[in-house]
Image: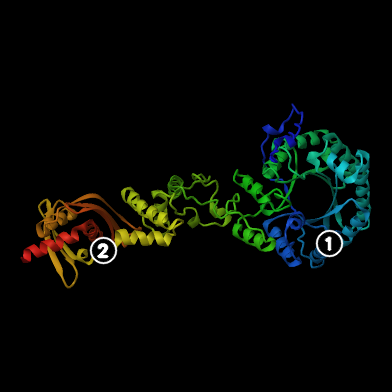
């Protein structure tokens, strides 16, 4: 029998909720963010963080603007206990930051948690127990009443522990673990039982955290569960509803976003979604999703590279180059059409006072996350003229005319195919220089003189090497036309200028000029060349001479010399 058998599984039941309201809502502000990197994220690492690494991560989270940070399970391990004591005793917790500790609903663990928290200004004590049918039957062997009794006893121990330290501002948090796989009416029942112990209606801050411990359904189903729970919970107005989604189906962020629409006030998650199995909800992604919609995420994510570096150093986990918003390649285009659109979009913004960002293929300005534009367009065999032109313009200030960009793109593509990979900006410029700028000494213009005779321009050009100069003279309607005539008269070379462009490389009277020419030479070929110079006319004439030389006229030049000597 085939082991890949879908009949072993069943569809997750839908929530009957014809009055659902969340699909018509919009987010207007960020939820309360709670980082669980130091506990839920840490427990999923092959090598858990040391105290020093936790300290570095904690400092990063504070700099980013997190106001609630879960710092450990102090009753579960000595390193967690020591870390909690360290940040309290060394006064490393800012006044506007609340730390959170996790504990199971067992008396000795709750007591140990309070011992770790002694002396803290404010804290969240987070107690949990599993409530789903599979957990009740297979793990605990208890019925609903038995599991509810665990939750109630845990709530009582949490309340009693807090009473011993009245100088601390305590918030109580309860999680019916595996909420999304628990019967909704039972989840409400058990949470109300916990609330009856804590009395949030009397002013005790209470958080009810509803986890999708294992993501089992589509995000819209989770949103229905949250809205149903909020609709049926007595005293909903006295508690804060939190969600804690996981990424087993790849939808943790979407589930959290829809849960906020459905009534959640608070979201737990980690940086880059680190966590058990496929990970927790990625707070960075959800926060940037809000940011890209014009909402303040209430986190400072401008230090994007530093966030990635510290995360990698502390966790040993790599950030995927395709990770939303923060991956190395997420603002990079290799596709030719994408590169062309990005180049035109960025150029369109220049000189405009555009309040709203709108550039094709770039949902945000990469600079907002501390990225530069050098990585936006990178060149490989899939790239086109737009990308190649963008690199030359961005890194070297060279703007190619369309006809030359097409020609040079073919040169670059051939090079990328030969080396089977990406080509750097430095390599692109080297190709540009060798194919269009570099010239044969025979076609180096030494000097020129122009004079006008009626409607014609007379050109006298000295070209070639210092040792073997050649003087050519001709006339035409302009300088370039006079040069072409001089080549016919003096060297018997018949050339036609098919394309010509010239422009300044900067602003002001001292800006250098760039001239580009494509020339067809009779019985030789066609070639293009580029010349730079302080003198615009000099650059124009040199570009034509260089193109003629590249077209194969060098042989013709020496053949004509030999015939004259004969």
Q: Report crowding for label 1: few under 14, some 14 to 19, many 20 or more residues within 10 A (C-alpha).
A: few
User: Is residue 546 left or right of 382 when viewed as pictured?
Assistant: left
Q: Which image quarter: residue 27? A: top right
Image position of 368 with respect to 235: above or below: below
Q: How is the image coloured?
A: rainbow
Image position of 62 with respect to 211: above or below: below
Q: Earlier in the sequence, mark 2 or mark 1?
A: 1
* Residue 97 image offset from top left, x and y in percent: 76, 57
Q: Residue at x 38, y 54 (%)?
A: 414
Q: Which residue is mark 2?
A: 439
Q: Quadrant of the N terminus?
A: top right
* Residue 170 image offset from top left, x and y in percent: 86, 53
Q: Which image quarter: residue 259? A: top right
Dot 2 and dot 1 residues touching (CB under 8 Å): no
How far apart are labels 2 and 1 at the CA level? 73 Å
Q: Which residue is mark 1?
A: 77
Image position of 293 with respect to 312: above or below: above
Q: Nearer the viewer, residue 564 or 390?
A: 564
User: Is residue 555 left or right of 33 when viewed as pictured?
Assistant: left
User: Is residue 97 left or right of 143 when viewed as pictured?
Assistant: left
* Residue 363 image offset from top left, x and y in percent: 54, 46
Is label 2 in a helix, a strand or a loop? loop
* Residue 226 image offset from top left, x and y in percent: 77, 37
Q: Nearer the viewer, residue 277 or 540?
A: 277
């Amino acid at each position: 029998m085939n082991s890949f058998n879908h009949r072993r599984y069943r569809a997750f039941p839908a929530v009957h909720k014809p009055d659902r309201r969340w699909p018509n809502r919009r987010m207007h502000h960020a939820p309360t963010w709670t980082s669980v990197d130091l506990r839920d994220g840490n427990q999923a690492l092959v090598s858990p963080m040391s105290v020093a690494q936790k300290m570095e991560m904690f400092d990063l989270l504070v700099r980013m603007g997190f106001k609630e940070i879960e710092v450990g399970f102090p009753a579960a391990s000595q390193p967690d206990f020591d870390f909690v004591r360290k940040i309290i005793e060394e006064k490393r917790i800012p006044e506007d930051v609340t730390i959170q500790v996790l504990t199971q609903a067992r008396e000795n663990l709750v007591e140990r948690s309070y011992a770790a928290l002694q002396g803290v200004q404010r804290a969240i004590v987070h107690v949990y127990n599993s409530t789903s049918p599979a957990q009740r039957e297979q793990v605990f062997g208890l019925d609903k009443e038995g599991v509810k009794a665990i939750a109630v006893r845990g709530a009582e121990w949490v309340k009693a522990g807090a009473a011993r330290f009245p100088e601390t501002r305590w918030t109580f948090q309860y999680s019916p673990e595996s909420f999304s796989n628990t019967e909704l009416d039972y989840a409400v029942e058990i949470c109300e039982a916990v609330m009856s112990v804590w009395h949030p209606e009397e002013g005790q801050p209470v958080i009810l955290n509803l986890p999708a411990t294992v993501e089992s359904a589509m995000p819209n189903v989770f949103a229905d569960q949250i809205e149903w729970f909020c609709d049926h919970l007595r005293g909903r107005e006295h508690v804060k509803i939190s969600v804690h989604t996981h990424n087993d189906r790849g939808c943790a962020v979407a589930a959290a976003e829809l849960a906020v629409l459905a009534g959640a006030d608070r979201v737990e998650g980690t940086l880059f979604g680190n966590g058990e199995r496929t990970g927790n909800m990625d707070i960075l992604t959800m926060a940037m999703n809000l940011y890209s919609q014009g909402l303040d995420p209430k986190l400072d994510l401008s230090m994007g590279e530093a966030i990635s570096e510290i995360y990698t150093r502390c966790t040993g986990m790599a950030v995927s180059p395709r990770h939303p918003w923060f991956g190395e390649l997420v603002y990079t285009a290799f596709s030719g059409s994408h590169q062309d659109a990005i180049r035109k979009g960025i150029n369109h913004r220049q000189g405009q006072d555009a309040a709203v960002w709108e550039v094709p293929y770039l949902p945000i300005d990469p600079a907002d996350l501390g990225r530069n534009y050098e990585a936006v367009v990178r060149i490989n065999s899939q790239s086109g003229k737009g990308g190649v032109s963008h690199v030359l313009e961005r890194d070297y200030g060279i703007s190619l005319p369309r006809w030359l960009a097409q020609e040079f793109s073919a040169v670059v593509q051939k090079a990328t195919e030969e080396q089977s990979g990406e080509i750097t900006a430095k390599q692109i410029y080297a190709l540009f220089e060798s194919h269009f700028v570099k010239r044969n000494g025979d076609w180096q213009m030494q000097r020129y003189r122009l004079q006008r005779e009626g409607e014609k321009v007379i050109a006298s050009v000295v070209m070639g090497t210092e040792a073997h100069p050649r003087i050519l003279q001709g006339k035409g309607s302009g300088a370039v036309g006079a040069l072409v005539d001089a080549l016919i008269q003096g060297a018997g070379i018949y050339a036609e200028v098919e394309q010509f462009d010239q422009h300044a490389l900067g602003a002001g009277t001292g800006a250098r000029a760039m001239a580009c020419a494509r020339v067809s030479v009779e019985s030789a070929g066609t070639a293009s060349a580029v010349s730079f110079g302080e003198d615009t006319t000099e650059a124009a004439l040199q570009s034509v001479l260089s193109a003629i030389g590249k077209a194969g006229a060098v042989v013709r030049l020496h053949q004509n010399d030999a015939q004259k000597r004969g």
